[in-house]
Image (cartoon, rainbow, N blue to C red):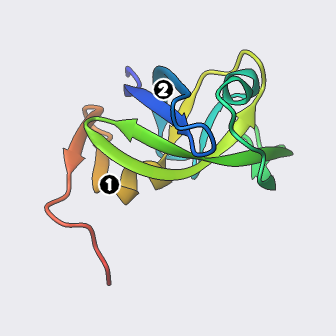
């Protein structure tokens, strides 16, 4: 099965003219988004803290994170981005998707927009 991917642009909150754009793997199993640390540093993203994350193989690793503006599929949100390893494939996490009312149809790897974002 082919995995869903989407062109995503991250913008530094500290330097709004600086952006990083790439094709991100959409991972509904990941809470936060992730990008190569070097790319985030290039655009001026500030490390706000560290968080422990469980990796796909079950190991737990601590990563720094920052806050960015996130644009994809014609939508805009803001959120956490993890400073990943140098050659890591960028990941768009479920928090960014849900914050703009987009779900992934896992049967055919397409995106579905919710008619409304739940506030209940």
- Name the residue located 74 percent from the left edge and 31 percent from the top edge: 84
Residue position marked by numbered label 2 in the rendering: 24
**Residue 11 screen position, x and y as percent:** 52, 36
In terms of depth relative to the viewer, which is nearer, 82 or 71?
71
On screen, 75 above or below 108? below
Which x, y percent locates residue 75? 29, 44
Callout 1 secondary element: loop
Residue 60 in view in this figure: no
User: Which numbered circle lies on residue 117?
Assistant: none
Dividing the image into 4 quarters, which one contains the N terminus?
Answer: top left
Q: Is residue 31 left or right of residue 98?
A: right
Relative to the observer, which residue lies in front, 30 or 17? 17
Q: Residue at x 48, y 28 (%)?
A: 25
* Displayed quadrant of residue 104: top left
Q: Position of residue 101 (x, y in %)?
A: 28, 56
**Mark 2 and mark 1 in contact (Cβ < 8 Å)?**
no
Mark 1 lies on residue:
100
């Amino acid at each position: 099965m082919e995995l869903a991917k989407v062109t995503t642009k991250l913008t530094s909150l500290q330097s709004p003219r600086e952006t990083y754009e790439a094709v991100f793997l959409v991972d509904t199993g990941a809470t936060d988004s992730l990008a190569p640390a070097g790319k985030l540093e290039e655009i001026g993203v500030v490390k706000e803290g560290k968080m422990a994350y469980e990796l796909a193989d079950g190991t737990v690793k601590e990563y720094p994170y920052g806050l960015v503006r996130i644009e994809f599929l014609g939508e805009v949100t803001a959120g956490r981005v993890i400073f990943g390893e140098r050659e890591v494939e960028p990941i768009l996490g479920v928090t960014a998707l849900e914050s703009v009312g987009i779900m992934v149809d896992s049967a055919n790897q397409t995106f579905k927009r919710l008619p409304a974002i739940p506030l209940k």
